[in-house]
Image: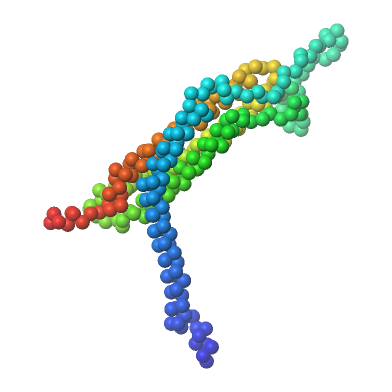
Amino acid sequence: MFSTISNNPSNPRNESNNVLPSGYTENEVQEYKDSLKTKAEELLVKGFPEKIVKLNELLETPGFSNRKLSDVHQDLNVPIPDPIILNHSEDAPAAKKLKLDNNGEETSGTKVMVLPTGPVPCNKKLCDLIHIVKPYIRQLLEDSNLLKMWISFLIPKIEDGNNFGVSIQEDTLSEIQSVESEAAAFFDQISRYFISRGKIVSKVAKYPHIIDYRRAIQELDEKEYVSLWLVMCEVRNRYCSLHDLVIKNLEKIKRPRSSNAQSLY
């Protein structure tokens, strides 16, 4: 009889036992929100100014400042082969375009199996810069996400009237979301550079005598160098703009609805 009562789902004792996990979950969520708010405020007051100063110093280093575009050029390690002397005295059939195995697509140029001097390396100078730039892009992405969640937790419940502070919160939140999206796009820009360069390098290997493809590699490397410099400037500028925007409206962001309106009546 006692065992039947204890196993009954409708027993009040069982209901009281289910309250503890729910309470613990709510406490853990509240602790997460409180810790996130603390991290966001520390980041805003201390972290952003430090990052702005550090980025300014980095942009003044030789890798980003006063550097000639030709300094980022690198040898492709794809030699130009000697020209082939054709013997027209022999009754050989006319040269035709080569066809790829199995798919039947017509191609012209040299069918590349292996490069005689080894693989074509990436541009080491640009890879070194990318290794410096990517952590700052990722940090901007994480910091903007943290600020976004912080302001989201500060938005009060929906009510009629006295919503001017809430509109400031929403405008700030929209600006932070745009910064977050822009930071994510910087990663895509870097990956597209390697894809584009690989395609042109394959053209150089297939048509080694065409100098325009080799020049296209140099132009692409110069463009990527300028893009990396611009990305670092934009990361610095985004930290500055977010810091300035939030600090100027910090009172309304933290307390969007003041009690002063009640004293007017």
Residue 44 shown left or right of residue 129 in the figure: left
In the image, is residue 250 above or below residue 23?
above
Residue 234 can be seen, yes or no: no
In the image, is residue 130 above or below residue 46?
above
Residue 181 on image: x %, y %: 45, 41
Residue 12 on image: x %, y %: 43, 82
In the image, is residue 123 above or below residue 146?
above
Residue 66 shown left or right of residue 121 in the figure: left
Residue lying farthest to the right in this orientation: 90
What residue do we see at 47% from left, 80% from top? 14
- Coloring applied to the structure: rainbow
Residue lying farthest to the top in this orientation: 89
In the image, is residue 141 above or below residue 207?
below
What residue do we see at 45% from left, 36% from top? 55
Of 143 and 211, nearer the camera is 143
Quadrant of the image containing the C terminus: bottom left
Of 102 and 3, nearer the camera is 3
